[in-house]
Structure formats: structure tokens, C-alpha cells
Amino acid sequence: MHKQDIVNIILQQQNKSYLNITAQDFACSNIALIKYWGKKNNILNIPNNDSLSVPLGNKGAIVSIKISNQEQYYLNSQLLDINHIFFNRLKTFLDLFRIANNYYIVDIQCNIPIAAGLASSACIFAAIIKVLAKLFAWNLNHEQLSILARLGSGSACRSIHDGFVLWQAGKDKNGMDSFATNFAPLFEDLRIGLLIIDKKPKIISSTAAMELTRQTSLFYDKWQEIVNADLAQIKHAILTIDFAKLGQIAEYNSLAMHACMLTSRPTILYSQNATIALMHKVWQLRNSGLSIFFTQDAGANLKLLFLQQDVIQIKKHFPQIEIINPHNKMIIT
Ligand code: DP6
């Protein structure tokens, strides 16, 4: 099956023409505590393993779409050239939803760096789906919206939800059961810190890097075993509200994913010297009693996990940090 078949199935009972000329919505980025790394279906973005994430509060993308007689995409107020790599990605995705032969003017305002391992594609594709649902007044449930967002970027399916979000890989070969759901409410005092080391786009896209790892790393099967074990443990940590356990598992899972990438041929290394230096700093602080953990995605930047009670200490040790309260949602009606 192709993406268009999945879209047709999900939208078969829905409005075929738009009810509004313009609409706007926000979707936040999300950070995986248990990582998605490798697909069993590259066309439909069906992952090899379940993953689990936290939302990034008001960090994400506000997307406005207007039905028009021309196609234009703006990213942070800049008109994208037809040769821009993101132009094609957006167009290919929007082509799936040209039900009324319409064109779209899309304005994306993203308050996190693009393609730097901060899940910019997750929030952008999730926001696009939420806006299309408003334009066409689709009556879809969260699971269906999550599947549609997944077709844009795998991790986008987790940005449809709040709380601790679980994306089940699913068993269906067409991915009709591969969507995200809310697993549990977030810990009230959980905070996330962004340590931006490099805002430049990543050296290799996550799509290409995860496929290279899957195809060439001899440790890929082991990574799958680790994910399953980590997922079981982190679910337990969430249900028992055990932050230290959650942090340990998340940090380990991230390191295991990067270790697996290192064993790809050619190797994939997103870390820079500053990334490693900050990891050592986190470990030193933890040894001295601070409950702080890191996770890293496809980029050099680190995200720290800690609790509200330690915010003053964290700011003292990491003056450059941006602290996010994942409960702070941006609501756009
Ligand atoms: C390391 O969702 O960006 O952030 O599905 O190919 O668009 P595509 O990949 P993407 O990969 C995210 C990888 C990750 C881990 C995660 O978010 O789970």
C-alpha cells in the first residue's frame, strides 16, 4: 500500500470539500524517552519498535493554511524556494490531501531550530494535520489523526497527544494500528531543559540515518531487545511516579541508540565535543546528588530531565539552558 491508499481509507467517510478557507493550529514537539530508530516499512513510516515520549510544552510549530490558487510555503516568514529540501517534503505530504484539487499557502512558524534534532518535523507535520482537519472539518479520532501525521514524519504521530505518549509499532502490515496514544499523565513537576549546542541542520537526516543503522549495524537486533526491556521498565517507572528510574532508563536508551548508530557502516556520530563535555557535567552533578539526566536525538543538542525543585541549581550549573514546562500548552482555537 502507498500513503495515498491509507489516506483514502481514513478519509473515505469525511468531507470531500473544504468548509473553511483558512485555519490555524499549534502542535508541540516531543522528545522520545524510548527512541524510535528504524522502520519495518519505509514508505508508511511503520517503526520496528514502540517508543515513548514527552511533549515539549509551548515549543513547536504554529501552522496556518489558506486555500488558494497557488502553492506557497513559508517557513519562519521565509518563502521556500522550489529547490529547498523541505519544499518537496511538504509538497509530497500535502499532495496526499488535495481532495478538492486545491492549492495551499502554508505558513509555518517554528520556535525551535529546524532539523537540528529537536523534533521540528514532528511538530510541523502534526500541526499540518490538525489544520487540515479544521479546513475540511474532518471528524476523526486522535488515533486516525496520529496515523495521518505519521505519514509525514514518524515522530509526528506522538505530537497529536498530551502526557506521556506511547507510539505502538503495531502488527498490521499497512500500519493501521501504528499510532500514538496517551499512556499516562505527566509528572506534575517534570521539567525539560534544552541545551542547544548547534542550531545548524543535522549532518545526516534521521530518516537516512535510521535506515543506515538498520541495514548495516550488527548491533541492530540487540538495540531492539534493549528497547523492549527499557520500555517495560519506563512504563513501570511512570506508573509508580519514580522520576529517578525514568531518568536512568531514558538516558540509557538514548546512549544505546547512539552506540548502535556508531556501529553503522559508515559510522554515524551526531555528538560534538561540547555534547560529550555536557554529558560528563551531568554525570558529575548526578554523582554529587542532583537528580538530572539527559537524552539526545539525531543532533548534537542535549535535553535534560529534572524536577521543578532543582530548577535553581540547574540554572546555576547551565546558564545557557532553556527550561520548558511540558504542561504549558499553546492553545489556538
Ligand atoms: C532520534 O521521526 O524524524 O528523534 O519518520 O523518518 O521522519 P522520520 O524520522 P523522525 O525520527 C526521529 C528519531 C529520533 C527518535 C524519536 O523521536 O523517537
Image (cartoon, grey):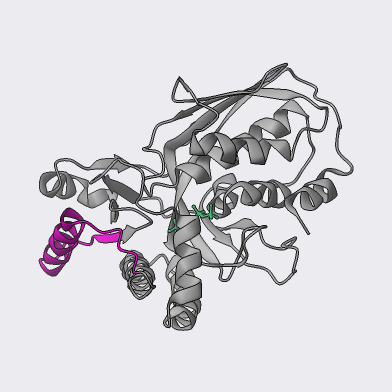
Up-down relation of residue 292 to residue 62 (above or below): below
Image coords of residue 67 (percent x, y): 71, 20
Q: Is residue 282 left or right of residue 108?
A: left
Up-down relation of residue 131 to residue 304 (above or below): above
Q: Extreme right residue here?
A: 13
At x 83%, y 46%, the residue is 8
Q: Is residue 92 left or right of residue 205?
A: right
Q: Nearer the viewer, residue 286 or 262?
A: 262
Q: Quadrant of the N terminus?
A: bottom right
Image coords of residue 180 (percent x, y): 61, 57
Image coords of residue 189 (percent x, y): 35, 50
> What count of labels does the image hold?
0
Image coords of residue 321 (percent x, y): 22, 43
Residue 288 visible? The answer is yes
Q: Extreme front residue here?
A: 83
At x 88%, y 44%, the residue is 12
Q: Nearer the viewer, residue 164 or 43?
A: 43
Is 271 magenta? The answer is yes
Q: Based on the displayed image, in which of its 4 quarters is residue 216 positioned?
A: bottom left
Q: Nearer the viewer, residue 232 or 226?
A: 226
| Stretch of the chain drawn in magenta | 267-294
Q: Based on the displayed image, in which of its 4 quarters is residue 165 positioned?
A: bottom right
Residue 37 visible? The answer is no
At x 47%, y 36%, the residue is 329
Q: Quadrant of the C terminus?
A: top right
Q: Based on the displayed image, in which of its 4 quarters is residue 201 positioned?
A: top left
At x 34%, y 71%, the residue is 245
Up-down relation of residue 279 to residue 148 (above or below): below
Up-down relation of residue 328 to residue 219 (above or below): above
